[in-house]
Amino acid sequence: AQKITQTQPGMFVQEKEAVTLDCTYDTSDQSYGLFWYKQPSSGEMIFLIYQGSYDEQNATEGRYSLNFQKARKSANLVISASQLGDSAMYFCAMREGTGNQFYFGTGTSLTVIP
Amino acid sequence: SQTIHQWPATLVQPVGSPLSLECTVEGTSNPNLYWYRQAAGRGLQLLFYSVGIGQISSEVPQNLSASRPQDRQFILSSKKLLLSDSGFYLCAWTGVGAGTEAFFGQGTRLTVV
């Protein structure tokens, strides 16, 4: 079974609008971490935001927030006030507390339309 | 501060030739190290990870191998490249614990011709 599932291969959003990128995960561990990364066309991987499994509050970092729904095993990324520079691939990732693997989803390509 | 170096940035190799990609980390000790491959327009596939010198775990059986001869050095190798080995290879490191993010190198674009 896939550890991380991202069901949106591509998304479009109007500049200045908000957009939600979906991510569901699969683990039987109680302790785990969820991450989102941005990959622009240059290929570099940029860390955006982190949510721990025991965190009760949704994580926020500037215009990024993580909508964490533990019972549904979802960790959606919300980008508010989209900018043209937000156009990139976005990857959801998970690290389980009992292991050392760092699993990534297949990614969502986001295009911001002027 | 910690930094991760990965080279070369681009590589064009003929089918059947050997491969050696190197990754080194500075500013930290005993990192977990990872090799990922990303096919064009696709997600990141975990190839190998290592928790210590000489300790290699393989996620996907394939034409590639990995080695960790030193604490902060991780090498991806192949004896004979296949066309299907083309892709974008990323090295990453993390600290211990589920809450530590992965830090990535700049990646190597490998084209096998």
Image (cartoon, rainbow, N blue to C red):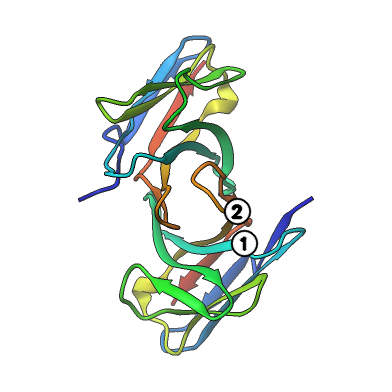
Q: Are marks 2 and 1 in contact (CB under 8 Å)?
A: yes
Q: Position of residue B61 (x, y in %)?
A: 30, 75
Tags 2 and 1 both on a single chain: yes
Quarter of the image where one finds residue B24: bottom right
Closer to us: A97 or A23: A97
Locate residue B35, reporting x and y percent: 49, 65
Residue at image x 64%, y 65%? Answer: B30
Identify the residue at image location x=58%, y=59%.
B107
Q: Is residue B39 visible?
A: no
Which residue is rendered at x = 54% and y = 43% of the image?
A: A41
Alpha-carbon neighbours of circle 2 within 10 Å: few (<14), some, or many (≥20)?
some
Q: Secondary structure at mark 1?
A: loop
Position of residue A110 relative to residue B29, above or below, is: above
Where is mark 1, residue-wise?
A: B31
Residue underneath mark 2: B95
Nearest to N terminus: mark 2 or mark 1: 1
Q: How far from the left and from the top, in percent, is residue B43? A: 38, 50
Left/right of residue A6 with respect to residue B111 in the rendered view: left
How far separated are the C-alphas under marks 2 and 1? 5 Å
Image-based side of B106 in relation to A89, left or right: right
Residue A95 drawn above or below residue B26: above
User: Residue B27 vs residue B49: left or right?
Assistant: right
